[in-house]
Image (tube, helix red, strand yellow):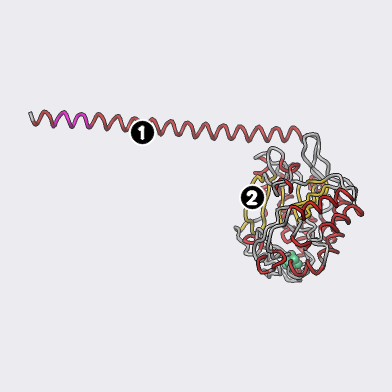
Amino acid sequence: MMKHTLFVKTLTGIVVGIMVVFALLHLDFREKQSEESFERRASEQREAIAQKSAATDAGFEPAYLELHRSGELGSRAEKLWQVMESCRLCPRKCGVNRLAGETGFCRAPGKELYISSYHAHFGEERPLVGRGGSGTIFFTHCNLKCMFCQNWTISILGRGSKSDTERLADMMLELQKRGCHNINVVTPTHYSAHILKALDIAAGKGLQLPIVWNTSGWERLEILKLLDGVVDIYLPDFKYWDSEMAATYSSGARSYPEVTKEAIREMHRQVGVAKPAEDGIIYRGLMIRVLVMPDRVSGSEEVIEWIAENLPKDTYVNIMAQYSPQYKAFDYPQISRRITAEEYERVVGRAREVGLTNLDIRGFWWLGR
Ligand code: SF4
């Protein structure tokens, strides 16, 4: 009797065990099926966005393609590369030999290329984001080194991975494949030679997206002239009106206001006013960012007046409210707080008074107004 009970128990155990194994296998199979179908749906979605993007920008050809076909893009890249021999890529004009591995003020490691990340970014200006996102590539290091930098781990500490121009070209192509509307190079100046080399490679492999030069605005005219016909969209900041403020909060960059005015004029000469196409996306033009800072540190009202006096009234101007004290900002009482709604409203009001018509003022949303 005992033996029989033991036999029945063992048999029941085996049957239950088999059922459990089958149930688990079934669950695993279902999970795999749902993972596969999720991946398939995501891939179909990406494909649809890419097709939509290709369909809506039909007829658009980025400026650099012509230069690529003629071989000029390659020679511009080479000229920029040679500038690194006694580096004068930016207004710091350090004169270090980056080709021999020397490092200047920006701390970009010689001629090596370091990239922090790349992805479809949905937080940029709406006409750059569209449905597929802005194909953003974040480069390490920076020549300006602002005391309030929100990306200081990337720009000051240089957190990122070693890369090269081939890999950078692949990133551009991958962002295009994902359905992004543009290639948005963030803080590009000290890597401008690498970017043009990569662009030349990517253009040869089918890149069709406009390049967004997402810069502090502190650019040398000589270097900008080498970007003429390469960049479709300039996205400069205009950070300071006053050179003392620029020197204090951006590591001695006293020349910032004067250099940036000339740079923005040149950018406008190259690409003109930014106007959205029928699909709402901007493919070409100048888009200026004005970050309102506490206590009038940025002189945003004067900056706005200068734009109205020196550029067309329909120049795209993004008046930004998202300043928040980061990095070393708490060492400076003047910039150790966020701005008030009144400070933001004053700048927007001035922009309206001077007749600027193409304002991006999502800052009201940011400030909860
Ligand atoms: S890019 Fe860097 S090394 Fe070259 S001049 Fe500017 S700060 Fe100096």
The location of residue 2, given as percent across then percent down, is: 8, 31
Q: Secondary structure at mark 2?
A: strand
Amino acid type at image mark 1? Leu
Check residue 10 for magenta coloring: yes
> Which residue has dot 1 on it?
24
Check residue 40 for magenta coloring: no
The location of residue 215, given as percent across then percent down, is: 76, 56
- At a point 73% along the width and 64% down the height, the residue shown is 144
Looking at the rendering, the quadrant in which ligand 1 lies is: bottom right
Please give the range of residues in magenta. Answer: 6-13
Q: Residue furthest right?
A: 309
> Which residue has dot 2 on it?
118
**Quarter-wise, where is residue 264 in the image?**
bottom right
**Disc 2 residue crowd, few under 14, some 14–19, many 20+, Cα 10 Å:** many
Q: Nearer the viewer, residue 80 or 260?
A: 260
Amino acid type at image mark 2? Tyr
